[in-house]
Image (tube, rainbow, N blue to C red):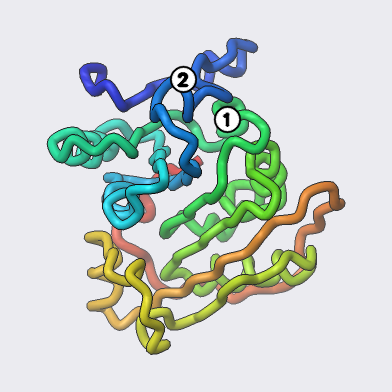
Amino acid sequence: METFPHVFQVSSHYVREGNSFSMKGKWNQEFFGNDNPIVLELGCGKGEYTVNLAELYPDKNFIGVDIKGARLWTGAKDSLQKNMKNVAFLRTDIEMIAHFFAENEVSEIWLTFPDPQMKKTTKRLTATNFIKAYLQFLKPEGIIHLKTDSNFMFTYTCEMVKLNEFPVLFCNDDLYGSGLVDPILSIKTHYERQWLERGLTIKYIKFIPLKDVSLSEPDVEIEHDSYRSYGRNKTQHA
């Protein structure tokens, strides 16, 4: 990982001690060398989605973020071999994400199959504490995408979005059964294909979090998922 020119590895201790990340506010100018929109994938795993999105949208810059270097290595190596100039990877704790991007530096965030954290709200990547963190660097009208197999995660996010009156651009609880024609549907990760083979539906919501509002957590009972996703018990997204 240390040899990859497009991989940044920063420990949470480094930023917790008050050190500033050198690329914060400078991703476009000093790394990508253009003014194209920056899109993050948080909890990117092996980086399959990051790389595929970058191939689909060469006019955007993509940064995959995960804490596990062994997983990131796959996407990092793939994108390097393909000589892709619009891809980078950041290895760090997602709970520290606001320390790596400046105000209005990011246009979109993808959350692809995050752990639903059914027992701890503040660990969910769509919980209001994370939304507040994202708003520190998202542009006005910046978009958050959630793609998940978890009915719990999807329902929680929909309730959070509804309660806080965020504009919803798209929402569907059976993405591949909806008849939607979109090139983004061609991207399926290894685990996503396994979930589909198990007969699970893939849910998707795209919304705009609002700045300068007091965010509230939904007070609703949500039935827990009755199955165990592949590798989820070993996944650390935050």
Compared to residue 218, the image places residue 96 above or below, namely above
| Left or right: 149 in relation to 7 | right
**Residue 101: which numbered mark, if any?**
1
Badge 1 density bin: few <14, some 14–19, many ≥20, Cα 10 Å: some
**Residue 145: which numbered mark, if any?**
none
Residue at 38% over, 23% down: 8
Q: CA distance from mark 1 to mark 2?
A: 15 Å
| Left or right: 211 in relation to 141 | right
Picture quadrant where residue 15 is located:
top right
Asked if one can make out residue 231 in the rendered structure from this viewpoint, the answer is no
Please, which residue is most extreme toward the left here? 81
Q: Secondary structure at mark 2?
A: loop
Indicate the amino acid at tag 1. Phe
Indicate the amino acid at tag 2. Ser
Asked if one can make out residue 8 in the rendered structure from this viewpoint, the answer is yes
Q: Secondary structure at mark 1?
A: loop
The residue tagged 2 is 11
Task: Give how far across and how far down residue 156 sits, in percent.
Answer: 63, 67
